[in-house]
Amino acid sequence: MAKLVEITGKAMSGEWGFDDETGNGIPVLRTTNFTNEGVVDYKNVVTRTIIKKNIDEKYLRPGDVIIEKSGGSDKQPVGRVVYFNGPEKTYLFNNFTGLLRVKDQTLWFPKYIFYSLYGNYRRGGTRAFENKTTGLHNLKVDDYVSRYEITELDHKKQIEVCEYLDKIYKVIKLREEELQKLDDLIKARFVEMFGNPVANDMGWNTLPLENACKSIVDCPHSTPSYTNEDTGFMCIRTSIIKKNKILWNDIEYISEDEFVKRIQRKKPEVGDIVYTREGAILGIAAIIDRDCNVALGQRSMLLSPDIDKCTSEFVCVAMNSDSFLDNVLKGVSGSASPHINVGNIKAFRMIMPPIELQKQFSNFVKQVDKSKVKVQKALDETQKLFDSLMQQYFG
């Protein structure tokens, strides 16, 4: 084992500078440019005016590892790392991050150092080096860097390990892209058949959702006591609700007594639609696609479409459209925690094409979903392989 500090030295501190009023500033990477996959997200890079001299060493180079010094939350520890593989002499990094740069690349392959740190973070290895101030989690970077150890391997073997992991990661991304394309196919088919559900550019009859559904109910306004033990009674948190699907593998459980309390208004059934109504995960619809004992957690509502008037697939895809969310948010104030009222959803006039046309769309969605299941299975298997190799190589 070798000490990280001996490989990279202490983490170099970042620069933030001043507001760029000319538009000719230097691009500076922030923690908002970090992804949980260790890849830099260049979509919203800010530019800053940096007047400090002698910062040439701080310009990022391919192979640099940037580490998060401040940020995170109770659920997401601070200490994420990203691997920089962009152009030289172009980007700086801000003061909430630090730079780790391999001193001797003939002994240590930079990507290998990144993967080691990335694996340690995913195992929760940075939590022991956190301290908390008001609203922030801070990483004791010097302590972490001085204590963390890297498994020593022959330089050639380091490269081989990284190349193998890189190949598997590329397969993972390809599988994710396949799933996204299948989702895009469903959206495109919806627009082709029905147009915009809010603008109603095809002139369909409309009906308030309250009249198109057997019921629309709010979730209980209380936080359940979750457990990882399989009690047979599941609870859907908003974090596992994605567009048109529920991440059942990440479900949590509650007691039978809690379950009974939470289904007083309505027990979720196959074909019902869960819709998130508050917080960061806002305005996302997914269908209950299995018969099980499940209840709603917080910040969501439940719609039960009347199958004589509309199909679950039609309503779900319509509610996931950007125009639908924009419409229901029109009357929402810019509060720290925006929310959608059940009354607004009940009153929304949904387009109502002929039920036979909706059924054609539903059949199309079900066929695409079969393909998605196969791709998702392949993705899960590839992810398991990646995780297993990370465990094998880095502990």
Image: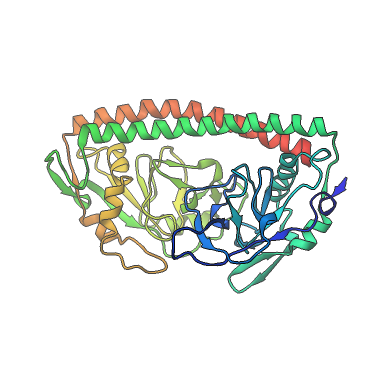
Identify the image quadrant of residue 135: bottom right
Q: In this view, does 362 lie above or below 45?
A: above
Q: Position of residue 286 (x, y in %)?
A: 39, 44
Q: Which colour scheme is used?
A: rainbow
Write the residue at 31% across / 48% down.
Answer: 322
Q: Position of residue 388 (x, y in %)?
A: 71, 35
Q: Please indicate whether residue 36 sits to the left or right of residue 300 in the image.
A: right
Write the residue at 46% across / 56% down.
Answer: 297
- In this view, the residue in front, 239 or 140, is 140
Write the residue at 20% across / 30% down.
Answer: 357
Q: In this view, does 271 lie above or below 72?
A: above
Write the residue at 37% across / 57% down.
Answer: 277
Q: Position of residue 78 (x, y in %)?
A: 65, 59
Image quadrant holding the N terminus, namely: top right
Q: Please indicate whether residue 384 sits to the left or right of residue 129 in the image.
A: left
Image quadrant holding the C terminus, namely: top right
- In this view, the residue in front, 231 or 246, is 246
Q: Of all residues shown, which one is farthest toward the front?
A: 53
Count up the numbered dots: 0
Q: Please indicate whether residue 333 sits to the left or right of residue 42 in the image.
A: left
Q: Position of residue 3 (x, y in %)?
A: 85, 51
